[in-house]
Image (tube, rainbow, N blue to C red):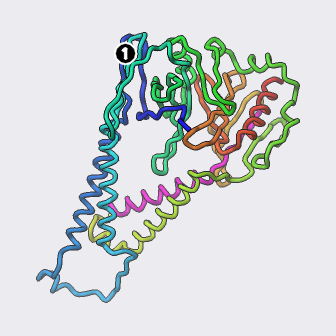
Amino acid sequence: MQPDFREHYAQKFRLKLDRLPTKATDRVSRLLLLLAFISGLMFLALGSYLVGFTDLSGTTDFERHITQTSIKIHSFISTATFSYLLLFLGLGIVLVSLFHLFRSKKVSFDGQTFIVKDFPVFGTPHSFEEPLSKYKGVRLRLKFCQYGLLSKNKFIIELYHDDPKKIVPLYISINPKHIRSIWKEYASALNLPPIHLSEKGMVAHRVNDMDRSYAEVVKEWNLPKDFVFEKKHSKDFACKQRQDKKLIKARHIMFDLYSVLNIFSIILLSLLLGYAFYNHSIIIKHIPLHLALACYALILTLIVYAFLTLMVKDLMIIHNKRIIIFRKLLGFAIQDAVIHFSDIKSIEIPFTPTTGRYALQIITNEQNVIVFNKFSANDLRWIRGFLVCEIME
């Protein structure tokens, strides 16, 4: 099955349309690649040093006069093996950095035609020209990105075409603020409908309707009051009322593929930290003590972050015409967002192709809040219906 989306390279991209002709380059940040390249070289240098150190044989005159210790030092893996692991890690980081360095896509627009030149690392560069009239709309979609232990939602605004190879990026960012306003601006400037992929397929909007509040829109639907309670939801979440507050929360921690990756990362980093502690006396012979302690602290921080990411649960409270989003972690609730009913422009259930999952997306002109990203589409429809009932009151 051919995907209906095209991958883009950058984390931050914008094709400005206020002055034509215009052009922009879709590629990974050069500063980020430079930092990664330097880190890879450091691992290579350290690995090369340790390989050379373990190749030394014999003893010096100075070493013959040193009192020999009777303490036996054991290691899970040999110094030579550890050295080659560092070499391979550094080489991998350097190669990935160079891969992204030479990969880019140049986009230009003269007001009538888009010209795109794609320069992949493997294969020959290719380009195409496509008139604006051939595009179906301006699409907003989400892409889940995993950077090691860090995970981000990438917001992509692009020109949608029936041929995925001709989809053109317009705006890319990991910052959700003002994304709806930016989406509307591109749709207005190009005179195309704003579209997005929902749980029911591709959905088109009218540009003028994007300024209306969601409360005005749902009142025109003439839905029966409390219609949502005729439907059932799964036991993955609970809906309760406490005094004048209504609460929706996940009953348990939900797992997906990225949860498995987090668990694997926790196990791997824990083993690495245990190995480092067990061989602390050897390590500080090769690197300064303060640097070793900094590395221990970094590994421990990554373990804690991965664990907290794994254990977090979403909590939603509806009170006084507001939606309050909390992230609940080990008994503590951290407030993430407060959204007034009057500010809501849309409540969507977008599909993220990279994870194969849905989420509840509450959109205002300033915010784009994503919650319950591990629930099924049916459960999310029930929650959206519940919010619609609350808004209609």
Q: Is residue 218 left or right of residue 74?
A: right
What residue did someone put label 1 on? Answer: 22
**Looking at this view, is 37 or 2 the one in front?**
2
Q: Is residue 247 found inside the magenta-colored segment of the image?
A: no
Q: Residue at 42%, 21% (x, y): give it.
A: 15
Residue 127 drawn at (x, y percent)? 36, 25
Q: Residue at 37%, 74% (x, y): give it.
A: 77
Q: Is residue 316 found inside the magenta-colored segment of the image?
A: yes
**Looking at this view, is 331 or 366 the one in front?**
366
Q: Is residue 259 left or right of residue 230?
A: left
Which quarter shows the C terminus?
top right
Question: Given the current orientation, which residue lies at the most extreme left position?
Answer: 61
Q: Residue at 23%, 73% (x, y): give it.
A: 54
Q: Quadrant of residue 55?
A: bottom left
Which quarter shows the N terminus?
top right
Which secondary structure lies at badge 1?
A: strand
Q: Which residues are magenta?
A: 290-319
**Looking at this view, is 73 or 379 the one in front?**
379
Residue 218 drawn at (x, y percent)? 77, 21
Residue 143 drawn at (x, y percent)? 53, 37
Q: Is residue 344 left or right of residue 159?
A: right
